[in-house]
């Protein structure tokens, strides 16, 4: 009798002559949390799409519970006890949470939907996940992190024996991650096996029993996560070389005040915000979900109703009523949700890059393609964007390279202030380091940067000063030498130090 609940043997898959999986092996034990690792484009999602019945392999075998089986559709995967939580959310915004949880699997009573049972079981699974969420709320009213939680709850409701979790914690705060991890351990103890796909290597070390690394569609290594395995070891396997974040930060000359915000308040979102951003400084804002930092900086960027209070730029009072005015004043904003707010899916890589500088590429209402090409060539080189042709769809790029295109869009506009909201969300370890290096280079050139991040380690690594927010207010300012992850978490959860 095999120890493995799942074995994928000699899996091959190609698209248009490009081999994306080559003789890949993957095995999963019963009641195991197994990390599937690799950079974007390594083949992780394709391999799991094959397991989930979304994609068919060219060749290879899938063995479930010792039996060779054919998984030719998502329904077939579900029949084998396999549930897949995809990166792309599959929720229906116009339905409630409980309706989404049972979508396609609705219980009935006397020929009618048993809404009472749906509501009761939805409430129970959310409580088990330590999530305070009303099942009657419309999904359209939820932010990205809670939509992810609903996806996880829906998979768990179907009593899966094999649960594939593709970047499940990308939009979650540290406290929410702990709740999800507690739930993962609980269902593991009940015999469920979990495939955990993540770029967050610290989380992999914390929650996983074993790991498999893919690179360029090939199996690189697999083994248990024990005392010999740390984040550096895993990162080196993923990219094929040693990576170091420790030497990233370097002191630099910081000038006088550039952006000053005084008494900024917006009812229900944030109140009495005071801070100063200096020239060439990297300033961090962190906290937990709902702390108000994104709402604050969207207002500063001119999105939505104005706030009470005043703002000074270069010592002069400014009133920013639109994002267009913010851009004119030299303020750029890279949003948190890249896929919904950062890129324009129907446009090419070049068009996404030059959209902020259309006045420079238009000549008598016609696009000057030479100027357009000069811009994309410059930033593709400066930011090491891995791409084919500029007229390829933006969706053809990996998450990390899409993020670099969004950065390029704002760098082309030559901002004085660049606001980065979770700048490395959903990108792989190699791209994360490259983006960090880009941020440091920009600061050295004199650009003032605000980094909004839920990851304490990210702001500790990059920032000269750090503000911690709690319930819409700045609770504490840390200089770089006095900040650490423990202090930040205490303040972010309402504590005092």
Image (cartoon, rainbow, N blue to C red):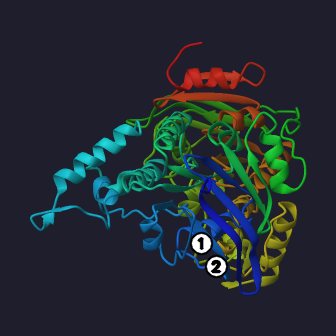
The answer to which of 336 and 417 lies nearer the viewer is 336
For residue 36, above or below residue 296: below
Q: Residue furthest left?
A: 110
For the point 68% across and 22% down, the residue is 478
The answer to which of 60 and 99 lies nearer the viewer is 60
Could you say where residue 393 lies in the image, as x and y percent from the top left? Answer: 66, 78
Q: What number is the disc on residue 442? A: none
Q: Residues within 10 Å of mark 1 (few under 14, many from 20)?
A: many
Name the side, left or right, on which 301 lies relative to 38.
left
Residue 353 sits in quarter: bottom right
Could you say where residue 367 lies in the image, as x and y percent from the top left? Answer: 71, 83
The residue tagged 1 is 50
What secondary structure is marked by label 1? helix
Residue 200 sits in quarter: top right
Could you say where residue 244 lies in the image, as x and y percent from the top left? Answer: 87, 42
Say whether marks 2 and 1 touch (CB < 8 Å).
yes
Number of dots carrying numbers: 2
Q: What number is the disc on residue 57? A: 2
């Amino acid at each position: 009798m095999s120890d493995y609940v799942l074995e994928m043997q000699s899996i091959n898959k190609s698209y248009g002559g490009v081999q994306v999986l080559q003789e890949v092996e993957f095995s999963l034990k019963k009641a195991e949390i197994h990390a599937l690792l690799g950079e974007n484009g390594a083949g992780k999602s394709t391999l799991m799409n094959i397991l989930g019945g979304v994609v068919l392999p060219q060749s290879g075998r899938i063995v479930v519970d010792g039996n060779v089986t054919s998984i030719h559709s998502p329904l077939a995967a579900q029949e084998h006890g396999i549930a897949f939580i995809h990166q792309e959310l599959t929720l229906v915004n116009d339905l409630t949470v409980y309706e989404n949880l049972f979508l396609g699997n609705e219980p009935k009573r006397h020929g009618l939907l048993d809404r009472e049972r749906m509501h009761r079981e939805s409430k129970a699974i959310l409580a088990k996940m330590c999530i305070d969420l009303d099942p009657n709320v419309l999904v359209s009213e939820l932010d990205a992190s809670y939509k992810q939680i609903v996806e996880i709850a829906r998979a768990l409701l179907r009593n899966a024996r094999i649960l594939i979790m593709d970047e499940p914690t990308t939009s979650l705060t540290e406290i929410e991650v702990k709740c999800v991890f507690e739930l993962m351990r609980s269902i593991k103890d009940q015999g469920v096996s979990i495939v955990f796909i993540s770029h967050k290597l610290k989380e992999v070390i914390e929650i996983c029993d074993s790991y498999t690394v893919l690179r360029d569609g090939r199996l690189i290594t697999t083994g248990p996560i024990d005392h010999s395995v740390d984040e550096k070891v895993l990162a080196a396997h993923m990219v094929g070389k040693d990576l170091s974040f420790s030497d990233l930060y370097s002191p630099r000359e910081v000038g006088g005040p550039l952006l000053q915000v005084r008494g900024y308040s917006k009812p229900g979102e944030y109140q009495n915000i005071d801070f100063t951003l200096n020239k060439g400084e990297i300033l961090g804002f962190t906290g937990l979900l709902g702390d108000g930092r994104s709402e604050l900086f969207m207002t500063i960027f001119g999105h939505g109703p104005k706030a009470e209070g005043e703002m000074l730029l270069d010592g002069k009072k400014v009133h920013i009523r639109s994002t267009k005015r913010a851009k004119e004043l030299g303020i750029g904003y890279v949003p948190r949700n890249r896929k919904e707010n950062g890129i324009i899916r129907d446009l090419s890589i070049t068009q996404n890059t030059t959209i902020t500088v259309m006045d420079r590429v238009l000549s008598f209402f016609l696009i000057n393609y030479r100027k357009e090409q000069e811009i994309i060539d410059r930033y593709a080189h400066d930011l090491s964007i891995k791409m084919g042709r500029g007229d390829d769809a933006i969706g053809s790029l990996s998450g990390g390279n899409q993020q670099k295109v969004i950065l390029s869009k704002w760098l082309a506009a030559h901002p004085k202030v660049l606001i980065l909201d979770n700048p490395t969300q959903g990108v792989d370890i190699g791209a994360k380091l490259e983006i960090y290096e880009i941020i440091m280079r920009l600061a050295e050139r004199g650009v003032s940067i605000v980094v909004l991040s839920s990851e304490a380690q990210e702001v500790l690594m990059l920032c000269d000063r750090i503000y911690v927010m709690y319930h819409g207010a700045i609770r504490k300012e840390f200089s770089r030498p006095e900040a650490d992850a423990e202090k930040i978490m205490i303040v972010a959860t309402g504590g005092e130090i």
